[in-house]
Amino acid sequence: MRSYDLTPFYRSTVGFDRLFSLLDQVTSDGSPGYPPYNIERTGENAYRISVAVSGFSQAELSIVAKENTLTIKGEKTANENSGNSSEVLYRGIASRAFERVFQLADFVQVKNASLENGLLHVDLVREIPEAKKPRSIPIGGGEKAPQVVDGSAGKVAA
């Protein structure tokens, strides 16, 4: 149970809606811990999200990247059509549907996804455009500014 209310901040700030929405998500009581996942840094601008999806096939998983959000969903198909007449006495392997949502930073793009050994790996790369990268500005020496000659009167303007 949350003991504070962020509503006054919504009314008195402009442009911080996403920040307060993230705080609401973090403090919500119903945040599921299923399925477990890891976030790894694999390079200077490369990341990998690994989600434990044992028992799910590729057809039962979906990955959607929209704006700054990555959504991974898993929906288990019914097992009645499998032709297996056995009865499950204990179910320790979870097979419930799930949805994991990750907030991505600006300029982070999904490059690859693979499923191996019960782990779904999603590779991400941060590609900053050249216009947004910092650039070095040379500092000029003590030269005088160029003079402009006024063509009509032949006078030098400073």
Image (cartoon, rainbow, N blue to C red):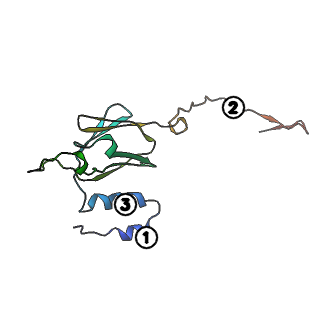
- Along the viewing direction, whichever of 5 and 42 lies nearer the viewer: 42
Amino acid type assigned to the residue bearing label 3 in the image: Ser
> Based on the displayed image, in which of its 4 quarters is residue 32 positioned?
bottom left
Amino acid type assigned to the residue bearing label 2 in the image: Lys
Q: Who comes first in sequence, dot 2 or dot 3?
A: 3
- Above or below, 42 against 26 in this view is above
Tally the marks.
Answer: 3
Front label number (1 vs 2): 1
**Separation of disc 1 and disc 2 at Cα?**
53 Å
Judging from the image, what secondary structure is the residue with disc 1 in? helix
Provide the residue designation for mark 3.
21
Provide the residue designation for mark 1.
11
x, y percent for residue 60: 32, 46
**Separation of disc 3 and disc 1 at Cα?**
13 Å
Q: Residue at x 38, y 57 (%)?
A: 19
On-image quarter of the C terminus? top right
Q: Who comes first in sequence, dot 3 or dot 1?
A: 1
Amino acid type assigned to the residue bearing label 1 in the image: Arg
- Above or below, 42 against 35 in this view is above
Provide the residue designation for mark 2.
144
x, y percent for residue 124: 38, 37
Tell me if label 1 and label 2 are in contact, CB under 8 Å. no
